[in-house]
């Protein structure tokens, strides 16, 4: 547990952190967020004494950090910076082992630890340990940056905008990995960012700061629901509002399954069944020679009839409801639920089938609302 | 006079002169290096002080070697130590300047990361700052060595041998062969030593610091 008691820091006459009180539980993922100059980075760096506070006390468990030598304290606390800061003169292995070596671990223990850590992020030892930082991509470098912070088995890890310099795709995958790592390792993580989306995604607890003071401490859900200050609303307002609007305005075209299997009316049920089985779906759309839809057939229907000599169109469900692809998704969902249908065909304005809405589509769309935009495997 | 004939006549003396010359270079560069290296590290801890000290040393560097060696000769006499002190003093500045610049220019993010890992300032110095300043330190060393090879020619001015002896004798007796016979080996010596230093640098520079960064 980390406790801040009336902590203040001034640079010249400017107070950057003002009488701060905060406590952080073990194993918590805490995000410090706020506009630039709000004192979040200073707050972070006072924990490992990279910046000395002017007033107040910080306790880690029951130890007052002002009683601990700064260098020794920092060996017990992981630290990740935005610019990564891997040492270019050292190999990946040596970079990871910086802290264990300072802690004078035995060589076998060091060796084991490097294997274990590289495995944790899916970078095989044989391939990576002897490389130098400039031989890795930015994302890989920051993975090593995180491993370097984990190497000495510190209970606490400080991260100063660690993914700020990465491209959005890499950033997202590192965020996901970090989240998984944290669940697995139960570290206390204190993470500085100015990206509200990142905060909402990662944090157990968000600490919103402005002008050296804490405006609100809350879980992401609570902060979204009840922002304590107009500044917080502004900060995430865009995020909160647009997500809502965005999802409320989704059209059928944006949510539907697009990779359909089309079969002609005259095909035999067994052929159709094998086509369906080869795909990821469990149904096919039957179309005539003008590509106009005649019905939908599911694997279940084919099994039910078991009549190999019939034409597929004879066993198909030919009374499928159709919706325009520009219709609002929520209206289509309502229609489906009201009529107790399992699927709807989505049509473009030339009366061609472009997609399908099923119960799975509804589920995925709802999931997106709850968990945010992720790469949903449909 | 052909090369063969020249070597036939002066070969032994030439070898001796080269050895003496090399001794001057090695000893004075070694001493200069130690002084420069230590001083550069001290100065890098006090950047304010160095903004005064380094320009002042730079001015001293512009005193012609001829004058300096002459003045030392008056006080110390015709001893090898006179040459070594003079050359050593001149060797200091390029190494000092480059080592200092190299250390000062190490990416501050690396220093912050190193502190964040819990290194103390001594550990940061020898694990991070010096290794990352290495190429700059080496270019200072190379510069000093090459300069010292040419300055060591001045030793002959006060009768202390080295390749300068050929040059001075040649000038005195209006013998171009002798002048060239001293100047060419000195040039070759400078190039060879420069090349050796490059070789050593390449050998000890980790792959991670090569290829431009």
Image (cartoon, coloured by chain):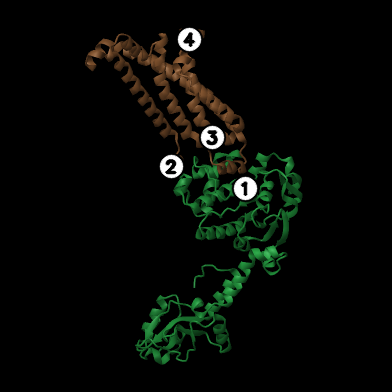
Task: Please report contact status of discs 4 and 1: CB closer than 8 Å, yes or no.
Answer: no
- Rendered position, A349 above or below A178: below
Residue in front for this viewpoint, A290 or A102: A290
Chain coloured green: A
C-beta proximity under 8 Å, tags 1 and 3? no
Report whether A205 appears left or right of B41: right
Q: Chain of mark 2?
A: B
Residue on which disc 4 sits: B73
Image spot of residue B203 (x, y percent): 41, 33
Left or right of A370, for residue A291:
left
Dot 3 and dot 2 residues touching (CB under 8 Å): no
Q: CA distance from mark 3 to mark 2?
A: 17 Å
Nearer to us of marks 1 and 3 is: 3
Count up the numbered dots. 4
Residue A231 sits above or below residue B130 on the image: below
Could you tell which of marks 3 and 2 lies nearer the N-terminus?
3
Instruction: Kindly state the secondary structure of the residue where label 3 is placed.
Output: helix
Disc 1 vs disc 2: which is toward the camera?
2
Q: Residue at x 64, y 63 (%)?
A: A235
Tell me, by letter, which chain the rendering colours brown: B
Q: Are marks 2 and 4 on the same chain?
A: yes
Could you say which quadrant of the image residue B122 lies in? Answer: top right
How far apart are the alpha carbons under marks 1 and 3?
A: 26 Å
Q: Are marks 4 and 1 on the same chain?
A: no
For residue B212, the mark is 2
User: In front of the other: label 3 or label 4?
Assistant: 4
Distance from disc 3 to disc 4, alpha carbons, whole Å, reads: 36 Å
Ranked by sequence position, the earlier of labels 3 and 4 is 4
The earlier-in-sequence mark between 2 and 4 is 4
Residue highlighted by disc 1: A78
Q: Which residue is mark 3?
A: B103
């Amino acid at each position: 547990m980390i406790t801040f008691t009336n902590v203040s820091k001034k640079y010249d006459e400017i107070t950057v952190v003002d009488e701060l009180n905060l406590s952080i539980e073990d194993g918590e993922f805490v995000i410090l967020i706020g506009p630039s100059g709000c004192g979040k980075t200073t707050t972070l760096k006072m924990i490992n004494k990279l910046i000395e506070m002017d007033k107040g006390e910080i306790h880690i468990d029951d130890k007052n950090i002002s009683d601990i030598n700064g260098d020794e304290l920092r060996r017990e606390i992981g630290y990740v910076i935005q610019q990564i800061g891997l040492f270019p003169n050292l190999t990946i292995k040596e970079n990871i082992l910086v802290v264990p070596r300072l802690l004078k671990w035995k060589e076998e223990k060091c060796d084991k630890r490097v294997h274990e850590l590289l495995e944790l992020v899916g970078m095989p030892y044989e391939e990576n340990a002897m490389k130098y930082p400039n031989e890795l991509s930015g994302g890989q470098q920051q993975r090593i940056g995180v491993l370097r912070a984990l190497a000495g088995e510190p209970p606490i890890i400080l991260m100063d905008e660690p993914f700020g310099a990465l491209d959005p795709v890499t950033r997202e995958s590192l965020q996901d990995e970090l989240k998984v790592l944290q669940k697995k390792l139960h570290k206390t993580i204190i993470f500085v960012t100015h990206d509200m989306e990142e905060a909402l995604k990662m944090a157990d607890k968000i600490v919103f700061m402005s002008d050296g003071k804490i405006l609100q401490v809350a879980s992401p859900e609570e902060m979204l629901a009840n922002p304590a200050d107009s500044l917080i609303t502004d900060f995430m307002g865009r995020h909160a509002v647009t997500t809502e609007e965005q999802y409320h305005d989704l059209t059928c075209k944006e949510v539907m399954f697009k990779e359909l299997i089309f079969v002609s009316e005259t095909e035999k049920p067994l052929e159709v069944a094998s086509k369906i089985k080869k795909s990821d779906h469990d149904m096919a759309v039957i179309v005539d020679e003008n590509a106009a839809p005649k019905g939908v057939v599911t694997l279940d229907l084919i099994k039910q009839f078991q009549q190999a000599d019939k034409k597929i169109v004879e066993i198909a469900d030919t009374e499928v409801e159709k919706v325009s692809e520009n219709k609002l998704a929520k209206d289509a969902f309502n229609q489906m639920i009201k009529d107790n249908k399992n699927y709807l065909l989505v049509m473009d304005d030339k009366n061609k089938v472009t997609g399908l809405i099923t119960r799975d589509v509804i589920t995925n769309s709802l999931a997106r609302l709850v968990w945010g935009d992720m790469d949903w495997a449909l | 006079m052909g090369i063969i004939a020249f070597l036939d006549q002066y070969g032994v003396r030439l070898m001796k002169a080269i050895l003496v010359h090399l001794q001057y270079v090695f000893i004075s560069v070694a001493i200069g290096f130690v002084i420069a290296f230590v001083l550069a590290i001290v100065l890098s801890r006090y950047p304010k002080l160095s903004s005064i000290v380094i320009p002042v040393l730079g001015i001293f560097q512009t005193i012609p070697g001829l004058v300096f060696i002459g003045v030392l000769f008056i006080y110390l006499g015709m001893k090898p130590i006179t040459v070594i002190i003079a050359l050593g003093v001149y060797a200091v500045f390029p190494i000092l300047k480059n080592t200092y610049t190299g250390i000062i220019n190490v990416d501050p993010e690396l220093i912050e990361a190193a502190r964040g890992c819990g290194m103390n300032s001594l550990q940061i110095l020898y694990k991070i700052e010096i290794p990352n300043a290495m190429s700059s330190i080496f270019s200072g060393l190379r510069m000093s060595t090459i300069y010292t090879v040419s300055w060591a020619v001045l030793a002959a001015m006060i009768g202390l041998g080295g390749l300068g002896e050929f040059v001075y004798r040649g000038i005195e007796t209006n013998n171009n062969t002798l002048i060239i016979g001293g100047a060419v080996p000195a040039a070759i010596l400078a190039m060879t030593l420069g090349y050796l230093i490059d070789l050593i640098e390449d050998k000890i520079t980790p792959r991670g610091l090569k290829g431009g960064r």
